Image (tube, coloured by chain):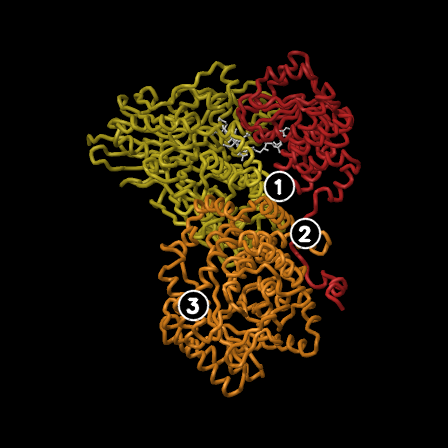
Amino acid sequence: MSYEELENKMDQTFIAVRYNVEIEGAAIKPEEDLDVVNIIPTEEPFRAIALAVLYEDRDASLANVEKALANDIPPIDIINKGLMKGMDAVSLLYTKGFYFLPDLMLAGDGMMEGIKECEKVLGHKSETKGTVVSFVAEGDPHDIGKNLVVMFLRAGGYEAIDMGRDVPTVDVVKAIKEHKPIFVTGTALMTTTMTVFPKVVEALQKEGLEVPAIGCGGGAVRKDFVESFPMSVYGVEAYHAPKLADAIVKDKKTWKDLRKEYADIVGEFVSEYS
Amino acid sequence: MNEKYAIALDIGTSGIRAQAHNLETSKIISTAITLRHPLPGANVVDHLHFAIEVGEETAHKLLINTINDVIKNLGINLENVERVAVCGNPIQLSLFHNIEIRDLAYWGDNVLKRLNITPPSRDATIVSSDKIGLEVNQKAKIYIPPAIKHEIGADALAMLFKSGVLEKNGIFLVADFGTNAEIALVINGDVYTCSAAAGPAIEGQMIEKGKLASPGAICDFEIVDSGWKSQVLDDELIVKEGNIVDPLNGNIIYKGYMDGKSNGITGTGVIAAFSLGLATKIISLPKIKSPDHMIHLQDEIYLSEKDIIMIGKALGAFRAAYLTLAEEAGILLTEIDSTYMAGASGFYVDPHKSLGVGQIPPSSQEIYQLGNTSLAMANDIVMNPDLLEKLQEIAKGMRSKHIMLATSSIFEKIYSLELAMCEQGMQFWMYNNWLNKYGFQKIPPQTSTPQIHKIFERDIKELGKNGLKIVKINSTLMADFEECTNCMTCTKNCPERALKMENGTATVRTDLCNGMGCLKCELSCPEKIFKFGKFLSMK
Amino acid sequence: MKRFTRMIYKNPDEMVFGKAKFPVSQRWNIQIGAGYVLPEIKVAPVEGSEESKEKMVSECRNITQSACDRAVAIGLPAFMLEQEHIFQQTNNPEWTAECTQIQAETLENYHDEYDIKISLRATPADIRLEERSPGLRESDYDNKVMESIEASAANGASDVAIETIGGKSVSDYGIARGDPKAILFGIGVLGSIDMEYMWKRIVNVCKKYDCRPAGDTDCAQANTAMFMAGGLLDKDCSHTLAALARAMAAARSLVAVECGAIGPLKDCGYENPIIKAISGVPIATEGKNAVCAHSDLMGNLTAAVTDVWSNESVYHRQEMGGTTPEVWLQATGYEAALMNTALQTGQEKVLRDLYTLTDKYRDPQGLVLAYDNAYRIGEAIVKYGNDPYLRSRAAALEAGAIINEAVDAKKMYLTRFERDSLDSALKIFEGLPAESDQFIDECLRKYSRKIAEFDPKSYEL
Ligand code: B12
């Protein structure tokens, strides 16, 4: 029997097991992941656009989008069938533990770059599920958590207005007036700055304004503190933000409902809410 | 006896240390310390916040009263004190000095603008004791050394000054690994500084069974047979042998002298456990691979997965910070000639473990453990008051190369990798690949032959002929709440049992209270009448 | 010096154990690669024997004596005894002389009495230190190495081999940090330069005596990567990167043959099958009967085209079955007997293929050394045969392609660690300059600053 015949005859696993692969799983291309296969479109140019986001390749993402626009593909389709699908896949791989924080940040850049290009052609902002205002408390520099929140919201189909860090309360109120957001997120990591949250609520009430909910999160913040004033809900993980927003938009949930049904809404066990 | 004395003071976030000098013989006479800080809270921001909420005057007085208690325990005639030198971080020194602190409590310009706050000068200065309220000879002069810049204070200056690297040629890393780590990279006399807010886990706080270094605290581990042998601090803060325990289930393999006598784990202990856990693969971030996902230590003390992530985030801040400095300064970590670890936790930690967990660059070949350099510099100043001027000069020269991590995109990128590693279980090789992808250097492999130089036996070099006294703080604040129904919900909710309530009069032990980071008393009050900010009067 | 730009073997199927295109004849009536496989035994002197010359000489005699006794006791027709020097032997060439002499005498007695075919291999240690001035060239240690080689040749060694360490400072750095460029520079460029320096001289020395210049191994570099890579679950060095390092090592170890070494190439050179495919010289290899020395992931595969089957190394001590020279010669002896039976019955290709297939897909490191793949890497090397840098790079790229093909064919699965390190290494290699000078310039600039032990003068750079 020839070498090839012998080789094809044998069952490899009978002889040697690559236990490292057994344990960690074989490295597959991200688009071959069984769940990602269902997300990434098969049709071009959307597939290439989605894959560029999935591969965190900002330049390719931009180039693909420009090419598609030049070929008169509707910008809305590019966003919804291409860029957003790529980002959906990234978020999925993140929750599965294959992608990490830096992957999210890079892929997010690629997606935003593409969306901006599409909006230039559209001449206006693209349709989203709704607008969310995100800020870091006045006097606080810690913005890594907020950046994540913004990223997840955008990946989830929301227009997130990123107000940055060290944002004065008056500016938050102004932004709420201007954008009429369906949800607001605030982040504070210092005990000196988390006191801003009740002040935002107070200022809104003074002006007779209301938002469905203000998600308050960040290292220093605790649930009992957040629940000591109205209109707020304590946010635990950044990727919970779009789920909370979904509950508000789709199911008309209020901040009171969010507090009660948090774990159900985000779809996982949350020790702070148990 | 009419001898002349001087006092050196170090005000740390976790306690006050004082030493008496005989000015005629130039000898240290005695040492007195506290094991906690009189202000509520676990870190400087808590101290700040408390001062802002309750009143800066109250905070200042609480601090000074405690210092007065401490120096009374030095056993000298305080009327004969000629001068006092003090050192500490800018927040502690400002509280001591009773000057503006709010500029240190917030980041950015907006709060300062809104509240019309002008940051005060924190240059070197000399004030008289009556102005501060110290109960020493009222004409005694008090020497306050300069801050380098904003959050980089006299304590950072002290570690640089005492390490002696400012005059040397070569590349040196100097760091004080506290809750807020001051880190400096000194390249042929050029100083790059930054401040990395690691978090209180590094001192054993925010860890379920954690505590500050104090009697009964587990402070180190080594692997013996198939278990972990703990080292425990006794009542004199001397390290004694504890039990050997199987970390997977808590079974005792061997009973040591401190069996039954430990009551928590301190920062160095947490680092040691983290290091052994990683080395023996019991920890596979963010998980603990024991049946109940805990690491079991002696006397039912344990570490949870939450604790492990906390310490990972804190150590990650160190690594991200020194890597950022190296990248900003354009050097490789492997080019560092020696590494200096200052502060108590940098003194008591086992550097072999620091290397393994990334607290210092794993390639560090020469490692010096300096001990408490703040107190050492205060000692230098009382013996040689002219030094103050020289220190001012040094501080001025360093201001230009301070790196604000808050606006450094390098830091943000690297810290995100740290988070991915400790919270999400990103593997170390991927971390290194990412560094490479970002165009940064990789973390070098660990040296197998580090040389460790521990110059003194304790973090305080010399205690003096009358030895060490540990002073108990007993400071309280009171407030009256007229509408109180005496339901006692607030006292029941106090995790530190620091609160007493009698007929609407609340009394809080300020040194035990967790302060503004906790507020369980106020938040749990069913009548919503408990206001923490009302604590005004001192007993 | 003539470099290989064509393959000596015309196709991989021609290669088989026990036969080489250019068999080697040595004294005591032995041929290597001429139709049979020899077992090899190598034993490290017991601790303490380095204290004096007398102790070392007696230790060497005892090892030789034990090996011969067992060879006769179990009826081995032929075997090779190798003595790998410890530092003191090489550093004192008169020790080398006396040790070699006593071994040669002992072996000759057995040859005379039983007509058993024997080969005595002397392997002086490369004790040179790059970080100590004047470096690898013309230092005291350098001279001692050459004197020891001469002492071996003059006192009865059938052949001499060595494991030289040129380029190790840089490749170690690269292996520890997963820096593929440093590995390529350390093995492919620096290693090759130093090989030329060493082997031209070794070949000249051997010419003066009845002693063959045998070969070198990239133990110091590629085996470091292999040991760091460790078992399947270890992550200190990626197994795919270790496989690339092995391919580069072939381009480097080939230099000995180009300088005049004739084989059998030294046992721990796992790259040897590639060199056999290129040059046709016989090779020694080790695998499952070297478990006394270390663990690898290709215990059978390395036997497929071997000519001398070795136990690598074992301490001289007592086992239940006898002393270690006896026990381990018996192990390699019976394995060689199996191969020789296959040769006699015309089944050698079947056995070769079975040996190969047991380990071909166990790990990427074995995969690239399977004789068909080894042949491909050989082809990549000779294509750029005249340029040590380009041919090492080509070897690495070909090894990468081999692994990728196996992955695409779903015959080999990689972890993400293995996958990512392979992808990034291949990407780096593809992006490297096409000119050797430019590559060397870049590397000199980058690594002379980073690596304290690296001394460009040692390579005349
Ligand atoms: C990184 C860090 C920094 C970086 C910040 C870089 C940046 N661009 O953000 C730098 C070094 C600049 C920094 C500076 C300071 N820091 Co800092 N810092 C940290 C550290 C180590 C980690 C914080 C972090 O990024 N966590 C990770 C992010 C992802 O978590 P997160 O923001 O909380 O977000 C998560 C959730 O909360 C949630 N989330 C957040 N918001 C929301 C909202 C919604 C709606 C939802 C659903 C979820 C959600 O999503 C995320 C998880 O998915 C912590 C200590 C620690 N171990 O935690 C200290 C810490 C926060 N810092 C602290 C301090 C005090 C400071 C300084 C004041 C210290 C100083 N010496 O000056 C300075 C401030 C600036 C100044 N005065 O100059 C203190 C605060 C103490 C307190 N009790 O208030 C801490 C706790 C450390 C300590 N000393 O104890 N710091």
User: Where, quadrant-wise, is the N terminus of chain B in this rendering?
Assistant: top left
Whether residue C93 sits left or right of residue B40 in the image: it is: left
> Can residue B301 be seen?
yes
Q: Which chain is yellow?
A: B
User: Which label lies toward us, 3 or 2?
Assistant: 2
Task: Tell me the quarter of the picture where residue C295 sits.
Answer: bottom right
For mark 2, what is the residue? Answer: C404
Residue B218 seen:
no
Mark 3 vs 2, N-terminal side: 3
Q: Which residue is mark 3?
A: C86
Q: Nearer the viewer, residue A138 or B183?
A: B183
Mark 1 and mark 3: Cα distance apart in space: 48 Å
| Ligand 1 positioned in quadrant | top right
Give the chain letter for orange.
C
The chain drawn in red is: A
Protein chain holding label 1: B
Query: Looking at the image, is A69 positioned above or below residue B351?
Result: above
Within 10 Å of the Cα at label 1, are there few (<14), some (14-19), or many (20+) other Cα atoms?
many
Mark 1 = which residue? B424
Chain letter for mark 2, please: C
Q: Position of residue B428 (x, y in %)?
A: 57, 45
In front of the other: C62 or B516: C62
Question: Disc 3 sits on a residue from what chain?
Answer: C
Image location of residue B70, percent across then percent down: 35, 32
Q: Hey, what amino acid is under mark 3? A: Ile
**Residue sitting at the far bottom:** C113
Secondary structure beneath dot 2 equals helix
Question: Is residue B393 shown left or right of residue B405?
Answer: left
Element class at badge 1: helix
